[in-house]
Amino acid sequence: MFYFDKRLQYPVKVENPDPIFARMLQQAIGGVEGEIRVCMQYFFQAWGARGPTTKYREMLLNTATEEMGHIEMLATAVALNLEKAPASLQEEGAADGIVGAVMGGENPRHTIEGMLHRHILSTGMAAFPANAEGVPFDMSHIYASGNLAADMYCNVAAESTGRVLAVRLYNAAHDAGMKDMLHFMIARDTMHQQQWLAVIEELGGHEGALPIPNSFPQSQEDQRHSYDFFATAADGSAPAAGRWTHGPSMDGKGEFTVFQNQPLGQEPVLGPARPDSGAQSEQIG
Amino acid sequence: MFYFDKRLQYPVKVENPDPIFARMLQQAIGGVEGEIRVCMQYFFQAWGARGPTTKYREMLLNTATEEMGHIEMLATAVALNLEKAPASLQEEGAADGIVGAVMGGENPRHTIEGMLHRHILSTGMAAFPANAEGVPFDMSHIYASGNLAADMYCNVAAESTGRVLAVRLYNAAHDAGMKDMLHFMIARDTMHQQQWLAVIEELGGHEGALPIPNSFPQSQEDQRHSYDFFATAADGSAPAAGRWTHGPSMDGKGEFTVFQNQPLGQEPVLGPARPDSGAQSEQIG
Amino acid sequence: MFYFDKRLQYPVKVENPDPIFARMLQQAIGGVEGEIRVCMQYFFQAWGARGPTTKYREMLLNTATEEMGHIEMLATAVALNLEKAPASLQEEGAADGIVGAVMGGENPRHTIEGMLHRHILSTGMAAFPANAEGVPFDMSHIYASGNLAADMYCNVAAESTGRVLAVRLYNAAHDAGMKDMLHFMIARDTMHQQQWLAVIEELGGHEGALPIPNSFPQSQEDQRHSYDFFATAADGSAPAAGRWTHGPSMDGKGEFTVFQNQPLGQEPVLGPARPDSGAQSEQIG
Amino acid sequence: MFYFDKRLQYPVKVENPDPIFARMLQQAIGGVEGEIRVCMQYFFQAWGARGPTTKYREMLLNTATEEMGHIEMLATAVALNLEKAPASLQEEGAADGIVGAVMGGENPRHTIEGMLHRHILSTGMAAFPANAEGVPFDMSHIYASGNLAADMYCNVAAESTGRVLAVRLYNAAHDAGMKDMLHFMIARDTMHQQQWLAVIEELGGHEGALPIPNSFPQSQEDQRHSYDFFATAADGSAPAAGRWTHGPSMDGKGEFTVFQNQPLGQEPVLGPARPDSGAQSEQIG
Amino acid sequence: MFYFDKRLQYPVKVENPDPIFARMLQQAIGGVEGEIRVCMQYFFQAWGARGPTTKYREMLLNTATEEMGHIEMLATAVALNLEKAPASLQEEGAADGIVGAVMGGENPRHTIEGMLHRHILSTGMAAFPANAEGVPFDMSHIYASGNLAADMYCNVAAESTGRVLAVRLYNAAHDAGMKDMLHFMIARDTMHQQQWLAVIEELGGHEGALPIPNSFPQSQEDQRHSYDFFATAADGSAPAAGRWTHGPSMDGKGEFTVFQNQPLGQEPVLGPARPDSGAQSEQIG
Amino acid sequence: MFYFDKRLQYPVKVENPDPIFARMLQQAIGGVEGEIRVCMQYFFQAWGARGPTTKYREMLLNTATEEMGHIEMLATAVALNLEKAPASLQEEGAADGIVGAVMGGENPRHTIEGMLHRHILSTGMAAFPANAEGVPFDMSHIYASGNLAADMYCNVAAESTGRVLAVRLYNAAHDAGMKDMLHFMIARDTMHQQQWLAVIEELGGHEGALPIPNSFPQSQEDQRHSYDFFATAADGSAPAAGRWTHGPSMDGKGEFTVFQNQPLGQEPVLGPARPDSGAQSEQIG
């Protein structure tokens, strides 16, 4: 179970509110690279963790709980960046504030209004769990497969795209407070990339953990093609050489080779449509 | 651009059609761990690949094109497993076939009908691009970040959950033809896990590629916390030791430490609601 | 604006409630082939109809309003088919009723419960706007393009898949009341297929209406390929002959020909990734 | 920010695992009436709370944090109910366990497998953030309007449908541990219904808070129709009398009356389609 | 069943078309606070209404039918506000009209084009069933629980967020015709808030209707916690006093108290992963 | 199975990159009128094609494979149009390039940034599988019904809305390279409209193929209403005459007539709510 502290994990300060930057921050809240995703992903992985020890459940709970605080920081940052956005055309002063602070005076407030409609119309100037384009976060992005190693790579993927996003936001930010908040979050993403890869290492690294799942005997897979790079160029030309076309495989269990792809199967023929199946008469055998 | 061969990449044969197994195979077509996802993900990564060489675009096109053939194999397998499923109660013979072959005789066909309604009602006994529960595949799962290393980890994640799924399907299959098809696909997943990790190695491995993106100077992140495991247990107890709590970090650039999480920020106070913002009067300052 | 009559358009009677058939009927309510779709599609086409006359707006309103009554009939049919479904294990009598009437006695009520969870848990035994698998209807399926002829073909498509679905439901039904209701709805789908094609004819038929939109001068399209069937077989073999490979085109404005597809363009080369774009260093020029 | 305790808020025990009940519990996790919804809704309301005091932010954080613990309890309950579900046909013993414990022996395990495919194929026997039919939770259901009173009614609605769901699950449960867990959750839903209504009372009750938003001067609305029940029966018959057809309005500011609906506007005529708009030529003026 | 009148319920006039306002109006059509939602919600509640009388079915049909006319008014308003929006760069005159009327001359038409792409590209300048950001309405927002009181609170919630939205649109409008249309719709929202609360009163008010569902004996819930406010602050501090922390509960059946939350359960331990479950070997017991 | 050529089907050149046009092109990639839709629709129709010949499977594979190349062309065009878009405020020169080329100097780059956030934040200046407003493509739009004639009309509908979209993009384009690419794609849409109608003709045209499905005996539908236009105007007025109100039906099997709609059914009365169903006590009989 859980507890809260009404203070934030790290200071969130905005000197010059920027409503367009507020929109961008939404990507880090409700985008597929964002914090709701990692928070919920780590929680569901924790709650379903099976194995001889509860150590991984606990580790995941530690980090999922940390991420909850990151959503809170970002939601606060969005609300602060919207402090002076225009709620309606009647609010001349507020709108002028925007124009002055953000737009350099040359852009009519109506355009800004158009870009902020969701914040104006649906939230009263607050964050919401959707991405920068208003697409609501959809929980199918919570990857929790029941395989610990697969989940760790899902987490590395999430923190890699997450740090890429945070860096892009940092580069787009022009407020010292926002840069400060983001430079903290970027550091945390650095750690989290490390952390999940450290679990893979603890699980045996490439040799011990791969191929995932390692509980399936490789003798049952089609070992003729386990380390083949399939080339599918129509002219049959050889692909450019890379680490993946020759040399030992990453798990040390095979040799990379190039295989020119070709049909090993036949043209499929399905049976005719069935009576009463609602097909056209011509399809019914 | 693209060409097709009307033959399949690998033989797809079904001796004893099993409509419930057809449903399960849908997960490998339209599930988030499935083949539409990897096919489209590799294509979009290829089409957006930037850098000094077109080598990665080409590599991605090779494998995306291969995956298109996997969707085709699975769609064919679904159709073949539905060959004798009951389209309506009128088709006594067909239904009996099902009962005989799959159910051992003791289950009324109506229950099966209930489980197959989508195949019966919407496709006329064919595959469709949705998962085993009928949830349509949603293209937000195509991860293509513009960062090559982040994309490679997204691909490792996809092939890890993909091979876990294929193994589960293999374990659930009882038809020799289906086991044969799956043992081929499992081998290909083995290779694809290797392949994306090989790109990471070519890009410098943990030391060269991490933290992702490696183009952001680490001096600009909050280096006090880049390699800290944040412990968030309410009682302040130390977390269990793991590869991630001490020792050198995976990228060789820091030391893992444990940091007991605590609020570094303050309680946030938002401004009052604005006039004309549609809040209650009590919220307006 | 609109009015209602509390009576139904056509009688809806269920002698032997069948909860699994209730599930199937959901496809005709909230499936992409269902009645919410056509109702809303015709309304939005009506409300956006532009042109020299309001005749098409009025025609669309007539039929959209009729379809609203079809949703009502189906929702009523779902509720009536659930009358005796088990709400909980405590209700022994009710459950037995199901087993007796529908299952022939050999199936435990728990399985049925599993198949009906949404009706039991979320609606209290009523219809809801989702398909037979519980996927909510999503309004992106409302096609209203602003081009009258394109919209008519969208409507023919909707009524074609709609009548296919209705026929499949008719074939799966075993209650006289349900068959009666469906034989009425199938007749209406017959008319609606005719109706939208009649508009195309009024707009000039194939010759006058095609290609859609007919307001774009064909001189501006690449007329070298306007009536070519592009063959994409990898071995360059000719496609089987069909009405579309030779002879006059449907609009009478060209001749069908076969063109062996080949790259007319070059390999694309994108610029390097930009500084501050969050790519890996290796991608930045 | 947040902390966790690795213990659960309330005991979760399962004596006789029931995989079909596990599926049902998913509705309370990822259904629109479920715990992810209330947890995230209260958090986003808290993070966007504006007004003269932080009291409501704090109240909302208290309850949102409690709800996070409820998701955890339910996820644990799902995993425990799946402990003995069959992962594959090879596991004869496990499958027999299911048949013995749940099905009374007469149902083949294959049907159960078909009903559990998502848990088997995607999670390895754990909970996931989707409803009982596998539809992923979609964050558009997080209602946080920026108006405190509107949000409170959204919360009453959520806890009302939530308690209805919890009661239905309680009635469907047959395990003492599950009934114990649910009887605790039902009590909490009771409190939460009370709590949000108590805020409305603190905000002035019906007279002070309504109409929401109370910051809009009612003099600017069309007061001819503010308390009219619009009757839309096609035959013009009077509606049945109710609390809403006569007598003082709930806010004490008007009298309920019946108004027979009729068109006050005219038939709309849109302009012709524009040149270059892609309409048919016939639509372009 | 249903009938239409080709006239509108209330006049819809636009003197100065404003394409950005057209976008905003979309929120009232296809947003979760919009008219499609209430219309369909009341219809599905009506069609599933169970109880000793058809009075509530009829009341719901009256209002659902009214709401259908509101969607029509808004769709008309969107089309009229787009009358002079630029369909392409070729239409200089039209574009200039926009710039003159709406933008004050200083904004290039290309930006506007970017904000209207959906209306230009997909609808030919008409409304569509999506919100102001183009996210299609998704029918999972139709709440119809089978419990009359729960449904009424869902309706109050819908009309509360609906009126907040209408007020925000009124405040953003600058066209007399639009203000007139909205001041009518705001009045109707006032009535509908009243109406659903009047049903609650008819059902016994707080004392008779709560806790919802009132058919579940409170003796079966965990009455130790039915009226406790759970405090979850990590430092154990007492929450600020409110109507919900002490005094009689709203239903008159208990006393509000504060309970300091703490784990009543234990750390959960799941069984090991199963053989053939696709987990890593280390997880399998 | 499939092969690729790394060259494009047709040249894609962009002289003056226009990031707003890049956004618009997204509609042709991931919109419901776009190329992912037709590509996947034709593939799934091919893979499920049943009937006495594999001719239709092969025809569909030819065109689906062609469409895959169209997605590639559009994705390339998006990336090229974003070549000089600003990735961050730091990149002064790049931003100036945009302002100079596209905006005529008067619009601050920040507004453009706001309109491109998804490309900047999530893709690093590349295409992604979503529409012009960032809504991800959802595979429920893949229509493959198992009825060949119904599928052909779905394809005509797709190519009709597709060509309308392509024409709108052509009209909005101002770059010679983009106009060249689009004039090729428009020609292909012309052919594809023809092609699917040619299949209908081969299947017997209106008389042979209608009503769809033609395998259902019309004697079983309610032939009293198969060719009736139902008029639903509340005042009972006759609808305007059209091809659909009188004269022979399109299939030559009936005569169009007008039928004034009226309730043929009765007011529905559902049974009371069931004990333990979670309804209010008042609803339980």
Image (cartoon, coloured by chain):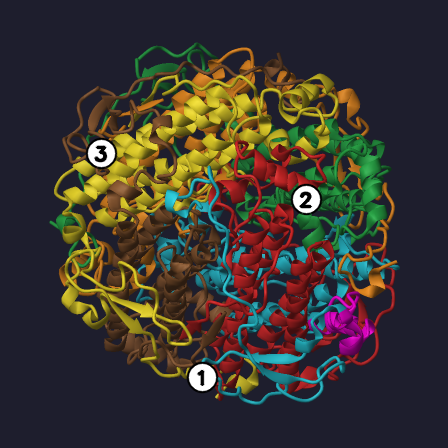
Chain colours: A green, B orange, C brown, D cyan, E red, F yellow
Q: Secondary structure at mark 3?
A: helix
Query: Can I make out residue A279 in this image?
Result: yes
Q: Amino acid at mark 3?
A: Met
Q: Which residue is at 71% across, 21% downward?
A: B216
- Compared to residue D272, the image places residue A193 above or below, namely above
Whole-number angstrom distance, CA of label 3 to CA of label 2: 51 Å
Is residue B279 rendered to the left or right of residue F144? right
Is residue E86 rendered to the left or right of residue A279? right
Category of crowding for the residue at label 1, using alpha-carbon neighbours closer than 10 angstroms: few (below 14), some (14–19), many (at least 20): few
Choose top left, top right, bottom left or bottom right for residue F234.
Answer: bottom left
Labels in figure, total:
3
**Relative image position of residue D23 (x, y in whole percent):** 47, 60
Choose top left, top right, bottom left or bottom right for residue E116.
Answer: top right
Query: Can I make out residue E211 in this image?
Result: no
Q: Amino acid at mark 2?
A: Val
- Compared to residue A47, the image places residue E253 above or below, namely below
**Relative image position of residue E144 (x, y in whole percent):** 52, 70
Residue under pointer 3: F59
Rendered-image quadrant of the N terminus of chain A: bottom right
Foreground mark, 3 or 2? 2
